[in-house]
Amino acid sequence: MNKTTPFDMLWHKLNSESCSNLLICIAKKRLQHQLLALPKDITKAFARLPSSFQSWVAQTTLSNLLSEQITDESLRFLEGHWLAIIISDVPYQFFISVRDVEHSGLRKQSIVVKTQIEQEPDVTFSGDIDSLVSIAVREQDPDTLFFQRKLLVTGNTELGLQVKNFLDELDTSAFPSVLLCALKKYNDVMQTAP
């Protein structure tokens, strides 16, 4: 059951009003501008934190979001390889790999996230924050954005294809609803922005 939030009501009101009312138009444009700037502002603030903390937060978040894929070893293709994710309009980048770790005599996969690596990444996915969010909420697929030149993939072609296929098959329904809702709201605002 979808709950209507105060934000939803305000957004619906602003979208249903014609721009004949100057104050409504100004309020709508200002709200859109502030909402569209929010992910960039958060990412810029995050980038100012110590890199070890950034890595820990990203690694913990991805480990939780992708726990099922880690358990079934769907990410094995990244073992020994580095995937760079570049948010081109912030700018911000981080690197993801997978490694085997042994804990209490058991071997299991673990995600590794770093803000810097000492080598060239094997494959790089680069796009603006809007494009990356639209991939996350399944509004756009990576191929479409690639052909629109909004997603740049460089490096090892085979590994890049494996990453793309992983993203295509990723079931985001198990992700926290708060995260999905926030990303979808942002994507909705982005789509209606002039």
Image (tube, rainbow, N blue to C red):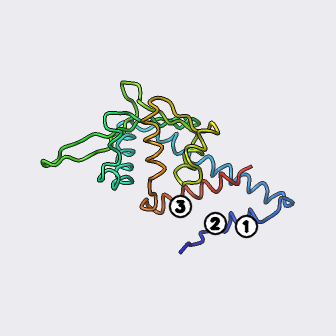
Determine the secondary structure under disc 1: helix
Indicate which disc residue 76 carries: none
Image quadrant in which you'd find residue 98 = top left
Residue named by callout 2:
8
Q: Earlier in the sequence, mark 1 or mark 2?
A: 2
How many C-alpha atoms fall within 10 Å of the one at disc 2: few (<14), some, or many (≥20)?
A: few
Place of residue 30 in the rendered image (x, y in percent of width and height, measured from the top left): 71, 52
How many C-alpha atoms fall within 10 Å of the one at disc 1: few (<14), some, or many (≥20)?
A: few
Determine the secondary structure under disc 2: helix
Between 42 and 4, the residue placed more toward the observer is 4
Residue farthest along the left direction in this orientation: 105
> What residue sits 48% from the left and 43% below the top?
164
> What residue sits 41% from the left and 30% below the top?
122
- Answer with left or right where residue 140 lies relative to residue 166: right
Residue named by callout 1:
13
Choose mark 1 or mark 3, whichever is in front: 3
Place of residue 20 in the rendered image (x, y in percent of width and height, measured from the top left): 87, 60
